[in-house]
Image: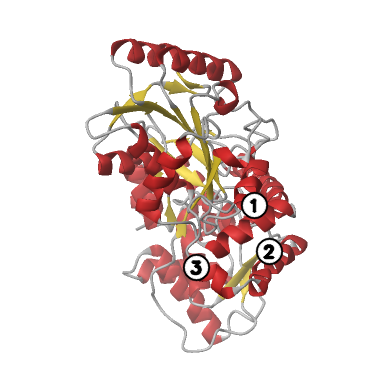
Amino acid sequence: MSNETSRWAAAIRASSKPAYVALADALAEDIQSGKLAALQRLPTLRSLALALDLNFSTVARGYAEAQQRGLIDSRAGSGSFVRETLRSGPVRRSPPAGLVDMTMNMPPEPRDRALLQRLREGFASLAEADPYAMLRYQEFGGLPEDREAGARWLSRHVPGLDGGRVLVCPGAQGALLALFTLLARAGDSIACEAVTYPGIKGLAAQLGIRLAGLPADDEGIDPEAFGALCAADPPKALYLNPTFNNPTTAVMSQERREAVAEIARRYSVPIVEDDPYARLPRQRSVSLAALAPELTFHVTGFSKCLGAGMRIGYVSLPSARYTARLSAIMRTTTVMAPPPMVRLATRWIDDGTVRAMTLAIREESMARQQLATEVLRKADYFTKPEAFHLWLTVPPAWTRIEFATHLRAHGVGVVVSDTFTVSGTAPESVRVCLGGPADREECRHTLEIIEDAIEQAPAMMSRVM
């Protein structure tokens, strides 16, 4: 054990504070006294954990605490080291460490300079628009050129589409609300996966609609269960999240899609195909809108292939006769999509920025999935190479609530399965998101905390707090 680690071990033993805070205090003391020099490299997390007889996540949280106070920095490939110049103001002693939020399923943010420049140019182009045109009411569903742009973007997944069957919406969530309102009334049922996107649970509760959860596996819902439900009590619609299901990452197989489309056609059950991730897989699936065009409302947007702040969505309709009905509902709830954002969406579809951004997000997602493969060696989880979330099975020593609570106490936020479960017992699983503003180094850091929790039993973890 080095002189530094000996001092830190003694300080941690003597302190009444949690071990991670005591470690950050010890670092602060050595930096202020000059025992640690500017730019001096610090021990790796694993070597320090071994030297101090602490678990990895406690040491990682101690380093995060020290970085939060402005004492140290970490760089990918270089490790952690003392800052060359401390941040202005007094050294803080014990603020709460920041939470690495892995709860929101945001796409990763590529740092490609050329792509960032394209985005900046797009935003700058709004200054050239007629400001009053951007401030006026516009036709709901988009101007003809905006609907045609949406049709061009959707056409790879919904063949034969034209602008007359497309509505531009202020985000996909508003479109789903309108579709549920169109297809069902209070007391009616809509079928869906038993573990599914939680946004529709809120919509159904708000509208008084019952959700009938169907069993599913990695290939999608069970067609026999769907057929049995339709034979007994046909639902008013079938909602599906068929590509990179949120949260399970399941992708409906071609066989399942064809079987479900045939059953829906037999019982005249409309399909709401919520497919925001469809453009991320390298291998494209045939959409339900292509298999059952007369029944399927295909919903998508930019939140997963561009950014969550780009609140523009598109609905392709089975026929143009639905345009007026759906427009009336959406006009009541949302009035219209913001004209500046619609203009930007059309520009980025036409100049290829949306496609370029989608490809960059795919590449960055694959890099982060590789990190997960390298770090989560003892974890049992489901995912896909191009997805930016994991569906992680909690180890038997933990419950899902204990596991999520422990991770939050160590600075990592995940979402428990109860949030996604429509029917049956919630599985002992959590969703872990790899995207958002965090860079790869921070992503690796949080995955290491998760892996450390998987390796340890709850009783072993509690001794360091």
Which circle marks residue 145 in the picture?
1
Residue 361 seen by the camera: yes
Which one is closest to the eye, mark 1 or mark 2? 1
Residue type marked 2: Leu
Q: Residue furthest right?
A: 114
Residue 251: x and y, percent?
56, 28
First in sequence: mark 1 or mark 3?
Answer: 3
Badge 3 local density, few (<14 within 10 Å), some, or many (20+)?
Answer: few
Q: Is residue 23 above or below residue 311?
A: below
Q: Which quadrant would residue 201 be assigned to in this image? A: top left
> Measuring 40% from the left and 52% from the top, which residue is drawn there?
331
Residue under label 2: 119
Residue 350: x and y, percent?
72, 52
Badge 1 local density, few (<14 within 10 Å), some, or many (20+)?
Answer: few
Badge 2 local density, few (<14 within 10 Å), some, or many (20+)?
Answer: some
Tell me the CA gap for discs 3 and 2. Answer: 25 Å
The image quadrant where one finds the N terminus is bottom right
Residue under label 3: 136
> Measuring 75% from the left and 55% from the top, which residue is drawn there?
351
Residue 416 seen by the camera: no
First in sequence: mark 3 or mark 2?
Answer: 2
The image quadrant where one finds the C terminus is bottom left
Residue type marked 3: Arg
**298 vs 69, nearest the viewer:** 298
